[in-house]
């Protein structure tokens, strides 16, 4: 029994679109600044739309909570030192293990970008414009943010890790230092 021809056309079109999207994502992978700039631009468009419409505060709150969760995954180590032992070497001859994130940078960016686009799409339907007193939501989000970051920073200090690196150190690229003899 063969499937309906329309089903084959739809599935082929869907596969083609997914392949094109994947090619775009693969090509965007090394362009970190451009990707994050696009996310900031999309976020500014979302903020402008919400500001102009004076609504969709529940959508904004959900977007904020989701992206806070993504940020936590981004700055959290993949293996918790409290449960699986220390990641960093404690002796001079111990093996060095670099910081490995629970959520890689590309997945963090991609999930954030998708969430902002979905948020923008939700602002086109009045179903999601639930009337709420937005200052309470904003205050609650800030409380969640500060409590969560305080706990995360304590974890970083306790296990002595820094989730950010600024690339490999380069030697000999700076200006020549003159000897002062």
Image (cartoon, grey):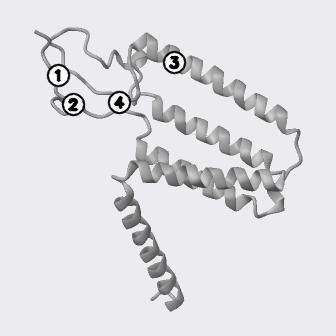
Question: What is the crowding at mark 3: few (fewer than 14 residues within 10 Å), some, or many (at least 20)?
Answer: some
Q: Residue furthest front?
A: 181
Q: Residues within 10 Å of mark 2 (few under 14, many from 20)?
A: few
Q: Which residue is mark 4?
A: 165
Quickly name the residue at label 2: 174
Q: Residue at x 36, y 54 (%)?
A: 29
Q: Are marks 1 and 2 in contact (CB under 8 Å)?
A: yes
CB under 8 Å between discs 4 and 1: no
Q: Earlier in the sequence, mark 4 or mark 2?
A: 4
Residue 76: x and y, percent? 46, 28
Q: How far from the left and from the top, in percent, is residue 60? A: 72, 46
Instruction: Please state if 21 lies on the left or on the right of 123 as rendered.
Output: left
The residue drawn where x is 83% and y is 51% is 55
For the residue labelled by badge 1, is the local secondary structure a helix, a strand or a loop?
loop
17 relative to 160, above or below: below
Picture coordinates of residue 114, whole percent (x, y): 56, 55
Placement of 134 over or under 175, stated as above or below:
below
Where 179 falls versus 107 (above or below)?
above
Q: What residue appears at the point 37 percent right and 53 percent down from the top-left corner?
A: 31
Q: Which residue is mark 1?
A: 177
Q: Which mark is residue 153?
A: 3
> In the drawing, what numbered circle is on residue 68?
none
């Amino acid at each position: 029994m063969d499937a309906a021809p329309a089903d084959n056309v739809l599935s082929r079109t869907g596969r083609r679109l997914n392949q094109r999207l994947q090619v775009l994502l693969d090509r965007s992978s090394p362009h970190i600044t451009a990707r994050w700039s696009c996310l900031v631009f999309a976020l500014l468009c979302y903020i402008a739309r919400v500001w102009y419409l004076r609504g969709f505060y529940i959508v904004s709150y959900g977007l904020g909570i989701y992206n806070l969760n993504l940020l936590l995954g981004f700055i959290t180590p993949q293996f918790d030192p409290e449960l699986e032992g220390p990641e960093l070497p404690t002796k001079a001859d111990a093996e060095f293990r670099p910081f490995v994130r629970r959520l890689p940078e590309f997945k963090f960016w991609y999930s954030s970008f998708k969430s902002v686009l979905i948020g923008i799409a939700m602002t086109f339907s009045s179903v999601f414009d639930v009337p709420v007193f937005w200052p309470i939501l904003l205050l609650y989000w800030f409380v969640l943010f500060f409590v969560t970051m305080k706990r995360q920073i304590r974890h970083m200090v306790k296990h002595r890790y820094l989730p950010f690196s600024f690339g490999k150190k380069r030697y000999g690229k700076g200006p020549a230092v003159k000897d002062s003899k």
